[in-house]
Image: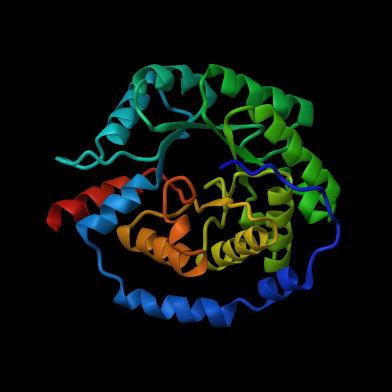
Amino acid sequence: MNNPGIPFKSNFSEEILRSAASINDELNNIVASFGLLESSKKEIEALVSYLDLTSLNGTDTPDTISKLLAKAKSPLAGNEIKTAAVCIYQPFIAQCAVELKNSDIQIATVAGGFPAGQMDLDVKCADIERSVSLGATEIDMVINRANPLTGNWRALYDEVKACKKSCGPARLKVIIATGELGDYTTIAKTSWVCMMAGADFIKTSTGMEKVNATLEVGFVMMNTIRQYFELTDIVVGFKPAGGIRTTEQAMQWHHLVKETLGARWCTKSLFRIGASSLLDDLAVKYMKL
């Protein structure tokens, strides 16, 4: 289900602001249960199915992308599980479309001034449209952080809304770059405005900030997703990215989503993990079980 968005409102409910300001107690209770988590083949298969297997390197070549796609199609030896998507730069979209033909693996690309987001909006939208025309089925777009940092919520709404329109049939995953937003209240407001504007997913980070995905900011974002659903009956997906390298970390994110949003969100249509090296650790753990 895509998020059609809702009309812009500049006033933020007290519930959103209160939950952002006092997350610690509830989160601590969930974190306390992490010690009870145990990996199993079923759990690792689920985690693999949530992966956006990513390669965003200046040294990427058609050969390295082919190897990435091979891993995405067969990530676990002797198992038919596939990753949810691959995430690559625009020049490799057409290659992915050919090599992933007849596969349900989504083709995600970063577009619109990644990773800084400092790009004229018309150019950003044209970049997104070009990516979709080449075969991208998902767009990971990063916001211009100047808008939330200066409290220009209308400009943020208009930016995301325009990018959503440029996506056409593709899903829009909006990266809010939490490590650069400063505090939980700003993160909550930013998440809310992006969902109002039509974000199909909200994503923590580009993976290139000094601070990327943390459980605390993820919890704030998940609470805004839950509140948006309660208000609109529209489901929005969640994607943590950046610094998630171990099976244990991935299990913690899975558990946090389940406890905060519910089992409905524990599917690849609503939960993704952005990572490049995580799959290697998952595969090693899987072979040992």
58, 155: nearer the viewer:
155
Between residue 164 and residue 55, name the one nearer to us: 164
In the image, residue 151 above or below residue 61: below
**From this viewpoint, is residue 232 visible?**
yes
Q: Where is residue 60 in the image (x, y as percent from the top left)?
A: 42, 26
**Which quadrant holds the N terminus?**
top right
Quick check: 230 above or below 59?
Answer: below
**Camera-nearest residue between 173 and 66:** 173
Going 69% across and 62% down the picture, which residue do you hit?
188
**Quarter containing the C terminus:** bottom left
Which residue does the image show at 19% across and 41% down from the upper left? 79
Look at the picture and state if 57 lies above or below 2: above
Which corner quadrant of the image does residue 20 belong to? bottom right
- Pick the residue in front: 23 or 119: 23
Q: Can residue 120 be seen in this view?
A: no
Which residue corresponds to the image point at 35% horizontal and 20% vertical from the top-left?
A: 99
Q: Residue at x 58, y 79 (%)?
A: 24
Instruction: Kindly indicate the quadrant of the structure image that contains residue 233.
Output: bottom right
**Horizontally, is 100 left or right of 111 in the view?**
left
Q: Where is residue 91 in the image (x, y as percent from the top left)?
A: 51, 20
**Residue 269 at what x, y percent from top left?**
47, 45
Colouring = rainbow
